[in-house]
Image: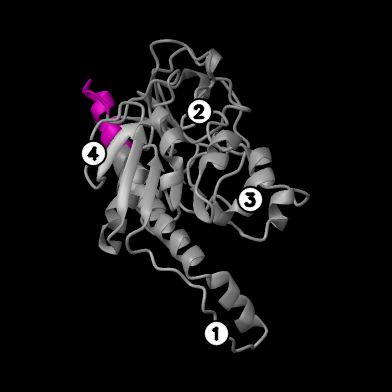
Amino acid sequence: MKVLFTYGYGKENMTSIADLGYEIYIDSEKTITNNQEYDDVDVLVCYNPFQTLNIHIMKNLKFIQLSSTGVDQIPQNIETGILIANNHGGYSIPIGEWVVLKILEIYKNTKYFYKLQENKKWKLNGNLLELKGKQIAFLGTGTVATESAKRLQGFETNIIGFSKSGKRKDFFNEVYKIEEFENMAALFDVVILTLPHTSETYHFFNEKYMKAMKYASVLINVARGKVLDEKALMNNYEKFLGIALDVFEEEPLEVTSPLWDIPNLLISPHNSWISEMRNTRRFDLIYENLRRFINNENIINEVDVKRGY
């Protein structure tokens, strides 16, 4: 059985894949194109090579293992019968830590103090807030939201989740159906977007929700850029105490984007998922799924591309 990787995981790890019974091909995702050998593979392990690699002519392709949590890069007209798995939960711990970091950066106004340090100024700020007792909402209650909520437990906050099902989950005080958020938006001090990007969630967080939110609240997006309506944010940013965006509708963010000039916005370059453990967790999942696939066992994290999860 043949497997094509668009990223190499080191000699020792790739040898362990070969020992499972795979013939391995490795190419760069940035330059990969179709050829006779690649068009004959059974498994593709990748992030997003689909701009230059046409999977529709890969007639033996039976399984795609993504290194990403999202699946929106998969062509929507993909052949039925091809199994697809994502890296569900693989980046949730560092992103959960990032969420806590950004809330605290905004509440403790670290941006102000860093500027003072750069200018060698000593000036007290008496307008800092504490996190204890705050009302926090997560739109989406997947692994990123769960790991974030787990890490917020020690701050004695009230954590409410909103999901499609409204099903109760650990680390959330309550969970409601997502359509109930509009009527509850004014209750929350912090709102965190952790929804997958699908046709249903495109620009989900729009001007309607921004206007419904409490004045001087905090907005954080670690989901996908297209979940948030950036034009609406440009018209409503002044009502927020602070905003932290790690994802954007178009990446990289253009230097001409007006988002750079929003004074209460913290921008990071889709970096929240990075940690020293990312490749270890990612490869462990890839290895286990390739082991399962070659042994005709159920794979982990199989996703429905049409639904987005």
Q: Which of marks 1 and 2 is in front?
A: 1
Q: Name the residue under label 1.
A: 124
- Depicted 59 relative to depicted 10: above or below: above
Q: Which tag, 3 or 4, sits closer to the chain's start?
A: 4
Q: Which tag, 3 or 2, sits closer to the chain's start?
A: 2
- Depicted 166 relative to depicted 108: above or below: above
Front one among 133 and 200: 133
Answer with left or right where residue 80 lies relative to residue 250.
Answer: left
Q: Which amino acid does label 3 sit on?
A: Tyr
The answer to whether the residues at label 1 and label 4 have Cβ atoms under 8 Å apart is: no
Q: Which tag, 1 or 2, sits closer to the chain's start?
A: 1
Q: Mark 4 points at which residue?
A: 169
Please report the residue visible at 35 percent of the width from the left and 44 percent of the height from the top. 145
Q: How many labels does the image show?
A: 4
- Find the distance from the CA under tag 3 to the CA under tag 4: 31 Å
Residue 43: percent from left, percent from top: 40, 25
Q: What residue type is labelled 1?
A: Leu
Q: Which amino acid does label 2 sit on?
A: Thr
Residue 12: percent from left, percent from top: 33, 50
Q: Name the residue under label 2.
A: 201
Q: What element carries label 2?
A: loop
Q: Does the magenta stretch include residue 242?
A: no
Q: Which amino acid does label 4 sit on?
A: Lys
Q: Which of marks 3 and 2 is in front?
A: 3
Q: In which quarter of the image is the N terminus?
A: top left
Residue 237 is labelled as 3
Q: Does the magenta stretch include residue 294?
A: yes
Q: Which residues fall within the magenta stretch?
A: 286-299
Q: What element carries label 4?
A: loop
Q: In which quarter of the image is residue 165?
A: top left
